[in-house]
Protein backbone atom coordinates (compact mmCIF):
# COMPACT_ATOMS: atom_id res chain seq x y z
CA UNK A 1 0.00 0.00 0.00
CA UNK A 2 1.41 3.41 -0.92
CA UNK A 3 0.55 6.06 1.63
CA UNK A 4 -0.36 9.59 0.56
CA UNK A 5 2.61 11.97 1.03
CA UNK A 6 2.29 14.19 4.12
CA UNK A 7 1.72 17.89 3.27
CA UNK A 8 4.55 19.81 4.97
CA UNK A 9 5.70 23.38 5.54
CA UNK A 10 9.37 23.68 6.52
CA UNK A 11 10.27 26.66 8.71
CA UNK A 12 13.81 27.51 9.74
CA UNK A 13 16.89 29.68 9.91
CA UNK A 14 19.57 28.22 7.58
CA UNK A 15 22.01 27.63 9.13
CA UNK A 16 23.96 24.65 7.88
CA UNK A 17 22.02 21.88 9.62
CA UNK A 18 18.74 23.45 8.48
CA UNK A 19 20.14 23.20 4.93
CA UNK A 20 20.94 19.48 5.33
CA UNK A 21 17.50 18.94 6.90
CA UNK A 22 15.80 20.60 3.95
CA UNK A 23 17.76 18.53 1.44
CA UNK A 24 16.56 15.44 3.29
CA UNK A 25 12.98 16.73 3.03
CA UNK A 26 13.34 17.70 -0.65
CA UNK A 27 14.61 14.19 -1.47
CA UNK A 28 11.88 12.30 0.43
CA UNK A 29 8.76 11.07 -1.40
CA UNK A 30 6.94 10.57 1.94
CA UNK A 31 6.60 14.37 2.14
CA UNK A 32 4.66 16.74 -0.09
CA UNK A 33 6.39 20.07 0.45
CA UNK A 34 4.11 23.10 0.20
CA UNK A 35 6.67 25.85 0.85
CA UNK A 36 9.49 26.99 3.09
CA UNK A 37 9.31 29.88 5.53
CA UNK A 38 12.45 31.59 6.78
CA UNK A 39 12.87 33.16 10.20
CA UNK A 40 15.60 35.04 12.10
CA UNK A 41 17.95 32.82 14.10
CA UNK A 42 21.37 31.43 13.32
CA UNK A 43 21.98 34.55 11.21
CA UNK A 44 19.78 37.55 10.40
CA UNK A 45 16.63 37.26 8.30
CA UNK A 46 18.09 38.71 5.04
CA UNK A 47 20.67 35.92 5.10
CA UNK A 48 18.29 33.11 6.12
CA UNK A 49 15.99 34.15 3.24
CA UNK A 50 18.87 34.26 0.77
CA UNK A 51 20.16 30.91 2.06
CA UNK A 52 16.71 29.36 1.62
CA UNK A 53 16.88 30.29 -2.07
CA UNK A 54 20.38 28.82 -2.29
CA UNK A 55 19.36 25.54 -0.60
CA UNK A 56 16.48 25.14 -3.07
CA UNK A 57 18.66 26.01 -6.07
CA UNK A 58 21.24 23.43 -5.04
CA UNK A 59 18.53 20.78 -4.95
CA UNK A 60 17.16 21.95 -8.31
CA UNK A 61 13.83 22.90 -6.70
CA UNK A 62 11.43 25.75 -7.54
CA UNK A 63 9.45 25.39 -4.31
CA UNK A 64 8.07 28.80 -3.17
CA UNK A 65 9.69 30.35 -0.12
CA UNK A 66 8.70 33.19 2.16
CA UNK A 67 10.35 35.72 4.48
CA UNK A 68 9.04 35.71 8.03
CA UNK A 69 9.85 37.38 11.34
CA UNK A 70 13.11 39.30 11.51
CA UNK A 71 13.30 39.28 15.31
CA UNK A 72 11.98 37.52 18.40
CA UNK A 73 8.65 38.60 19.94
CA UNK A 74 10.06 40.28 23.05
CA UNK A 75 13.72 39.51 23.77
CA UNK A 76 16.58 40.98 21.75
CA UNK A 77 17.84 39.01 18.76
CA UNK A 78 20.32 36.18 19.27
CA UNK A 79 22.62 34.82 16.58
CA UNK A 80 24.65 31.63 16.19
CA UNK A 81 27.06 32.89 13.52
CA UNK A 82 29.95 31.48 15.56
CA UNK A 83 28.57 27.98 14.83
CA UNK A 84 27.27 28.49 11.27
CA UNK A 85 29.72 31.09 9.90
CA UNK A 86 28.97 34.76 9.18
CA UNK A 87 26.74 33.90 6.18
CA UNK A 88 25.06 30.84 7.75
CA UNK A 89 26.23 28.59 4.89
CA UNK A 90 30.03 28.31 5.04
CA UNK A 91 30.71 26.69 1.64
CA UNK A 92 32.75 28.09 -1.24
CA UNK A 93 30.76 27.44 -4.40
CA UNK A 94 27.06 27.87 -3.82
CA UNK A 95 24.51 28.52 -6.59
CA UNK A 96 22.53 31.75 -6.74
CA UNK A 97 18.83 31.39 -5.87
CA UNK A 98 16.79 30.58 -8.98
CA UNK A 99 14.02 32.92 -7.82
CA UNK A 100 13.40 35.43 -5.04
CA UNK A 101 11.08 34.91 -2.08
CA UNK A 102 7.34 35.28 -2.62
CA UNK A 103 5.68 38.62 -1.81
CA UNK A 104 3.36 37.04 0.76
CA UNK A 105 4.64 37.15 4.36
CA UNK A 106 5.62 33.75 5.80
CA UNK A 107 3.04 34.07 8.58
CA UNK A 108 0.22 34.80 6.10
CA UNK A 109 1.37 31.84 3.99
CA UNK A 110 1.23 29.52 7.01
CA UNK A 111 -2.24 30.74 8.03
CA UNK A 112 -3.63 30.53 4.48
CA UNK A 113 -2.18 27.13 3.71
CA UNK A 114 -3.30 25.48 6.95
CA UNK A 115 -6.83 26.89 6.53
CA UNK A 116 -6.96 25.60 2.96
CA UNK A 117 -6.15 22.08 4.16
CA UNK A 118 -7.64 21.74 7.66
CA UNK A 119 -6.21 18.79 9.58
CA UNK A 120 -3.65 17.95 6.90
CA UNK A 121 -0.55 20.12 7.23
CA UNK A 122 2.53 19.20 9.28
CA UNK A 123 4.92 22.01 10.20
CA UNK A 124 8.58 21.25 10.78
CA UNK A 125 10.20 24.25 12.46
CA UNK A 126 13.96 23.96 12.89
CA UNK A 127 14.59 27.44 14.29
CA UNK A 128 13.06 29.87 16.80
CA UNK A 129 9.26 29.54 16.87
CA UNK A 130 8.48 33.20 16.10
CA UNK A 131 6.65 32.59 12.79
CA UNK A 132 4.43 29.92 14.34
CA UNK A 133 3.62 31.99 17.41
CA UNK A 134 2.66 34.96 15.22
CA UNK A 135 0.48 32.71 13.05
CA UNK A 136 -1.26 31.34 16.17
CA UNK A 137 -1.93 34.86 17.45
CA UNK A 138 -3.17 36.06 14.07
CA UNK A 139 -5.36 32.98 13.59
CA UNK A 140 -6.46 31.39 16.90
CA UNK A 141 -8.21 28.63 14.92
CA UNK A 142 -4.86 27.44 13.51
CA UNK A 143 -3.59 25.05 16.24
CA UNK A 144 -6.63 22.78 15.89
CA UNK A 145 -6.31 22.83 12.08
CA UNK A 146 -2.67 21.70 12.02
CA UNK A 147 -1.99 18.00 11.71
CA UNK A 148 1.17 18.22 13.76
CA UNK A 149 4.16 20.43 14.64
CA UNK A 150 7.50 18.60 14.84
CA UNK A 151 10.05 21.01 16.29
CA UNK A 152 13.79 20.70 16.61
CA UNK A 153 14.42 22.56 19.81
CA UNK A 154 14.67 22.35 23.56
CA UNK A 155 16.06 19.52 25.61
CA UNK A 156 14.92 17.21 28.39
CA UNK A 157 18.25 17.96 30.06
CA UNK A 158 20.95 20.54 29.66
CA UNK A 159 21.18 23.25 27.01
CA UNK A 160 23.78 24.22 24.43
CA UNK A 161 23.57 28.01 24.33
CA UNK A 162 23.41 28.26 28.12
CA UNK A 163 23.62 25.45 30.69
CA UNK A 164 19.81 25.44 30.76
CA UNK A 165 18.70 26.45 27.27
CA UNK A 166 18.91 25.12 23.74
CA UNK A 167 19.48 27.76 21.03
CA UNK A 168 16.06 27.64 19.24
CA UNK A 169 14.23 27.84 22.56
CA UNK A 170 16.44 30.62 23.92
CA UNK A 171 16.25 32.64 20.67
CA UNK A 172 12.52 33.19 21.29
CA UNK A 173 11.26 31.67 24.56
CA UNK A 174 8.01 33.67 24.50
CA UNK A 175 7.16 32.30 21.04
CA UNK A 176 7.98 28.78 22.18
CA UNK A 177 5.66 29.19 25.15
CA UNK A 178 2.81 30.39 22.90
CA UNK A 179 3.22 27.31 20.70
CA UNK A 180 3.52 24.87 23.63
CA UNK A 181 0.43 26.35 25.32
CA UNK A 182 -1.64 26.48 22.11
CA UNK A 183 -3.04 22.96 22.25
CA UNK A 184 -1.47 22.09 18.89
CA UNK A 185 -0.38 18.47 18.40
CA UNK A 186 3.30 18.75 19.07
CA UNK A 187 6.44 16.60 18.95
CA UNK A 188 9.74 17.87 20.30
CA UNK A 189 13.09 16.64 19.00
CA UNK A 190 15.58 18.12 21.46
CA UNK A 191 19.27 18.08 22.24
CA UNK A 192 18.91 14.97 24.41
CA UNK A 193 18.48 12.99 21.16
CA UNK A 194 20.12 15.21 18.51
CA UNK A 195 23.45 15.26 20.37
CA UNK A 196 23.59 11.49 19.81
CA UNK A 197 23.59 12.00 16.02
CA UNK A 198 27.06 13.20 15.14
CA UNK A 199 28.44 13.89 11.67
CA UNK A 200 31.73 12.08 12.30
CA UNK A 201 34.66 12.26 9.82
CA UNK A 202 33.60 8.82 8.46
CA UNK A 203 30.04 10.05 7.86
CA UNK A 204 31.32 13.24 6.20
CA UNK A 205 33.49 11.08 3.93
CA UNK A 206 30.45 8.96 3.03
CA UNK A 207 28.53 12.10 2.05
CA UNK A 208 31.44 13.27 -0.12
CA UNK A 209 31.62 9.85 -1.75
CA UNK A 210 28.00 10.12 -2.90
CA UNK A 211 29.59 11.91 -5.85
CA UNK A 212 26.82 14.52 -6.27
CA UNK A 213 26.84 18.27 -5.59
CA UNK A 214 24.54 17.98 -2.55
CA UNK A 215 26.85 15.39 -0.97
CA UNK A 216 29.92 17.54 -1.65
CA UNK A 217 28.38 20.73 -0.23
CA UNK A 218 26.96 18.88 2.80
CA UNK A 219 30.43 17.46 3.47
CA UNK A 220 31.96 20.94 3.21
CA UNK A 221 29.38 22.48 5.57
CA UNK A 222 29.69 19.66 8.09
CA UNK A 223 33.49 19.91 8.02
CA UNK A 224 33.25 23.57 9.06
CA UNK A 225 30.71 22.59 11.73
CA UNK A 226 32.98 19.80 13.05
CA UNK A 227 35.75 22.26 13.86
CA UNK A 228 33.34 24.23 16.10
CA UNK A 229 32.00 21.09 17.82
CA UNK A 230 35.50 19.72 18.36
CA UNK A 231 36.65 22.90 20.03
CA UNK A 232 33.46 23.64 21.98
CA UNK A 233 32.19 20.20 23.00
CA UNK A 234 35.15 17.87 22.42
CA UNK A 235 33.08 15.86 19.90
CA UNK A 236 34.33 14.34 16.64
CA UNK A 237 31.75 16.23 14.57
CA UNK A 238 28.66 18.45 14.61
CA UNK A 239 25.25 17.25 15.77
CA UNK A 240 22.64 16.63 13.05
CA UNK A 241 19.94 18.48 14.99
CA UNK A 242 17.59 19.70 12.27
CA UNK A 243 17.80 16.68 9.93
CA UNK A 244 16.60 14.52 12.83
CA UNK A 245 13.35 16.52 13.07
CA UNK A 246 12.67 15.90 9.37
CA UNK A 247 13.51 12.22 9.80
CA UNK A 248 11.04 12.10 12.70
CA UNK A 249 8.24 12.93 10.25
CA UNK A 250 9.43 10.52 7.54
CA UNK A 251 10.08 7.66 9.99
CA UNK A 252 8.73 8.34 13.51
CA UNK A 253 9.86 4.85 14.59
CA UNK A 254 13.51 5.98 14.38
CA UNK A 255 12.89 7.65 17.75
CA UNK A 256 11.39 6.65 21.08
CA UNK A 257 8.69 9.01 22.30
CA UNK A 258 7.08 9.87 25.58
CA UNK A 259 4.06 12.11 26.27
CA UNK A 260 4.76 14.71 28.92
CA UNK A 261 4.02 18.27 30.03
CA UNK A 262 6.61 20.75 28.75
CA UNK A 263 6.78 24.39 29.82
CA UNK A 264 9.15 27.12 28.68
CA UNK A 265 10.89 29.38 31.18
CA UNK A 266 10.30 32.98 30.08
CA UNK A 267 11.71 34.69 33.18
CA UNK A 268 15.13 36.13 32.44
CA UNK A 269 17.74 34.50 34.62
CA UNK A 270 19.74 31.30 34.80
CA UNK A 271 16.95 29.18 33.30
CA UNK A 272 15.74 31.63 30.63
CA UNK A 273 14.65 29.59 27.58
CA UNK A 274 14.74 26.23 29.32
CA UNK A 275 12.19 23.64 28.16
CA UNK A 276 11.10 22.26 31.51
CA UNK A 277 10.17 18.64 30.72
CA UNK A 278 8.04 16.86 33.30
CA UNK A 279 9.22 13.35 32.44
CA UNK A 280 6.88 11.69 34.93
CA UNK A 281 3.85 13.95 34.26
CA UNK A 282 3.72 15.05 37.88
CA UNK A 283 2.21 18.48 37.22
CA UNK A 284 -0.53 18.43 34.57
CA UNK A 285 -1.63 16.55 31.45
CA UNK A 286 0.92 16.17 28.65
CA UNK A 287 1.07 18.83 25.93
CA UNK A 288 3.88 17.28 23.86
CA UNK A 289 5.36 14.03 22.67
CA UNK A 290 9.06 14.27 23.42
CA UNK A 291 11.81 12.22 21.78
CA UNK A 292 13.77 10.33 24.44
CA UNK A 293 15.75 7.86 22.33
CA UNK A 294 17.07 7.56 18.77
CA UNK A 295 18.29 4.85 16.38
CA UNK A 296 21.27 6.90 15.23
CA UNK A 297 22.75 4.44 12.68
CA UNK A 298 19.39 3.94 10.94
CA UNK A 299 18.82 7.68 10.93
CA UNK A 300 22.16 8.37 9.24
CA UNK A 301 21.58 5.57 6.71
CA UNK A 302 18.29 7.27 5.74
CA UNK A 303 19.97 10.68 5.45
CA UNK A 304 22.79 9.33 3.29
CA UNK A 305 20.51 7.39 0.98
CA UNK A 306 18.18 10.37 0.48
CA UNK A 307 20.91 12.96 -0.12
CA UNK A 308 22.23 10.61 -2.80
CA UNK A 309 19.00 11.14 -4.76
CA UNK A 310 19.59 14.87 -5.27
CA UNK A 311 21.72 16.58 -7.96
C1 LIG B 1 19.66 24.35 16.82
O1 LIG B 1 20.29 25.61 16.86
C2 LIG B 1 20.73 26.00 15.60
O2 LIG B 1 21.99 26.60 15.68
C3 LIG B 1 20.70 24.75 14.75
O3 LIG B 1 20.41 25.08 13.40
C4 LIG B 1 19.62 23.92 15.36
O4 LIG B 1 18.35 24.23 14.82
C5 LIG B 1 20.43 23.40 17.73
O5 LIG B 1 20.45 23.88 19.02
CA1 LIG C 1 18.12 25.58 12.83
Image (cartoon, grey):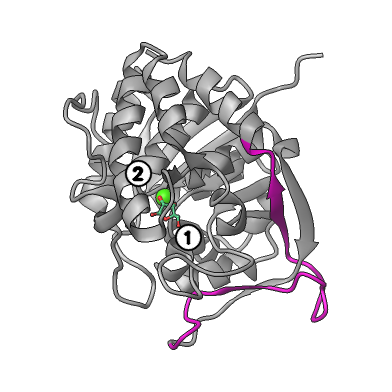
Element type at marker 2? helix
Residue in the foreground of this view, choosing between 190 and 289: 190
In this rendering, position of residue 281 left or right of residue 172: right
Which region shows up in magenta? 269-296
Q: Circle 1 sits on which residue? A: 129
**Residue 272 visible within the image:** yes
The residue indicated by pointer 2 is 226
Question: Which residue lies at the image location 59% right of the left edge and 25% below the top edge?
Answer: 301
Relative to 271, is 72 above or below? above
- Picture quadrant of ligand 1: bottom left
Q: Specify the quadrant of the image occupied by residue 249.
A: top right
**Spot occupied by residue 127 in the image (x, y as percentages of width and height):** 43, 54
Q: Residues within 10 Å of mark 1 (few under 14, many from 20)?
A: many
Q: Magenta stretch: residue 113 in it? A: no
CA gap, disc 2 to disc 1? 26 Å
Percent position (x, y) of residue 189? 61, 52
| Residue at 28% across, 31% down | 220
Frontmost residue, 19 versus 210 = 210
Q: Which SS type dominates the magenta stretch?
A: loop
Q: Looking at the figure, which quarter contains the C terminus?
A: top left
Instruction: Determine which quarter of the picture holds residue 62.
Output: top left
Amino acid sequence: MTLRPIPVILDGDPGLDDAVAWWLALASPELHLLGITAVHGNVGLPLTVQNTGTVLALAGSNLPYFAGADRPLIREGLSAASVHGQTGLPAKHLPQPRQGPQQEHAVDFIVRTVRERPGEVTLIPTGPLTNLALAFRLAPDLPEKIREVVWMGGSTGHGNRTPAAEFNALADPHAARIVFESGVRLRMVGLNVTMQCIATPERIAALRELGNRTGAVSAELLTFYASVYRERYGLSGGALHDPLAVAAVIRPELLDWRNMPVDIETQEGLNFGRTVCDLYSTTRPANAKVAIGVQDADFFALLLERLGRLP
